[in-house]
Amino acid sequence: MSLFGSLTAAISGLTAQSRALGHISDNVANSQTVGYKRVDTNFVSYLTQSSASTHLPGATIARPSYTNSAQGTVEQSENPLAMAISGQGFFAVAAATGTNNGQPVFDDRQFFTRAGDFGLDQDGYLVNGSGYYLKGWPADPNTGNPDRTNLTPIRVSQQVFNPVATTEIELGANLPSATVDNDSISTQAELYDSLGTLHTVNLTFTKNTSNEWTLSIDVPDAVTATAGTVDLQFGTAASATTTPGTLGNMLNATGTVVLPPSNNPGDLAAVSFDVDFGQGTQTVSLNFGAFAEAQGLTQYSSETFEIRNRNQNGVPLGSYSGLSIAPSGDISVNYDNGQSRVVARIPLVAFNDPDALQRLDGQAFMRTPESGEARITDASSNGVGKLVVSSVERSNVDIANEFTKLILAQRAYTANTKVVTTSDEMLQDTINMRR
């Protein structure tokens, strides 16, 4: 009988609208939750009988419609370790199941999230506000290249940056061509020993003839102060074809100074010398640019000795000073000696159907057969979107839209109660017909 069918259909409508109200309340409650994805409602009808001549009341159910692929607003954050994804990707994260000797033990299952409010915990792990550990590719300590075969929770060490002894000094300068013979010009360079101590190198250029100088290298606090000397020839003093003003040849090296293997045009114009500060011999290359080219050390007309470039590649001892993340996903540890070291790279993960992912507590997801396989790749590649640093992705809930849906759910629920009441009254009237 259609009256019973109407009653059943209305009751299913009440149940469906109640579930829709639950979705709405969940969305409103999480409207400020970082990385939250709202749940919409799809109403699906079920029929008992329907044809060209007959249609009997059926039922309706409310199914959740997930919006995991819907972008939330990317908002700038004061947290330098916060990250947002502009696009369809997810962060790969791990969940801790306990501790062992004070260190977290991780679940073997793979988890994913859009909540990028990461920060360093007491153990040096990058953890978001929901307690999930960010995973990444560890970087090779020498090259900084990521190991894409190893995806593990990222842990940052706050150890010191070991000092690096100087192996090369670069000097770009111009010796005044009008300098009187036997006059000297002095300058200084710096170098670090293997312990990170800074030392001074005295460089003295003495004019011999119009196009020839003698360079004396002296390191006052070394075991042997004088490293040696070398003659420098410019322009025609080196050869008739050497460009005037350019360094054409080095010769007559003394002490520990070693000449370059060749002096052809374009070859590296560098001598090396040995120095010892008590930790053993340290060989340093003194680079003057290239032979027969107007770079590095030159001899042109000028009133004074002009230094254009003076650098060395040594590094003193450095302490941890902070962490930075590049848009490429590279995580770098910064030190107070001005150096930095890439320790890991953050990849992003894409799915064929992200809306089919299994939702978990803390804005996390798990892969399902319907979502497809997880494709792990670099940021800004293969459709995973861009990494936006110092930002977070807010909930994609629109409060005004949720209130509109709330009003509709309330009205639909009330209308279904009217159908129940009317069906009940009509059934009562049918029963009363017997009296």
Image: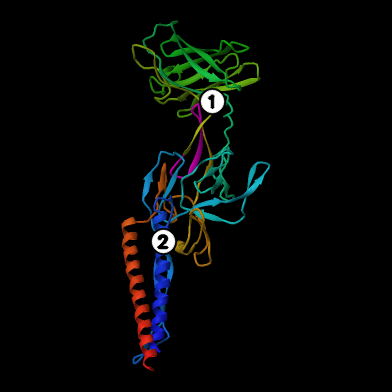
The answer to whether any part of residue 243 appears in the image is yes
The answer to whether any part of residue 66 appears in the image is no
In the rendered image, the vertical position of residue 89 relative to residue 182, given as above or below: below
Q: Is mark 1 on a helix, strand or loop?
A: loop
Percent of width and height locating residue 150: 59, 49
In the rendered image, the vertical position of residue 419 relative to residue 84, given as above or below: below
Question: What numbered label is drawn on residue 70?
Answer: none
Mark 2 crowdedness (10 Å alpha carbons): few <14, some 14-19, many ≥20 = some
Q: Residue at x 38, y 87 (%)?
A: 2
Q: Residue at x 53, y 45 (%)?
A: 127
The kind of residue tagged 2 is Thr
Q: Which residue is drawn at 65% across and 16% down?
A: 278
Residue placed most toward the observer, 231 or 270: 270
The residues colored magenta run: 325-339
State which tag comes first along the sequence, 2 or 1: 2
Task: Identify the coloring.
Answer: rainbow
Q: Say whether residue 314 is left or right of residue 87.
A: right
Give the residue at the far right of this rendering.
Answer: 101
Q: Mark 1 points at which residue?
A: 315
In three-dimensional space, the C-alpha distance between marks 2 and 1, rounded to whole angstroms, equals 50 Å
Question: What numbered label is drawn on residue 67?
Answer: 2
Mark 1 crowdedness (10 Å alpha carbons): few <14, some 14-19, many ≥20 = many
In the rendered image, the vertical position of residue 367 relative to residue 74, given as above or below: below
Q: What element carries label 2?
A: loop
Magenta stretch: includes residue 87? no
In the rendered image, the vertical position of residue 66 relative to residue 235, given as above or below: below
Percent of width and height locating residue 178: 36, 10
Percent of width and height locating residue 126: 53, 43
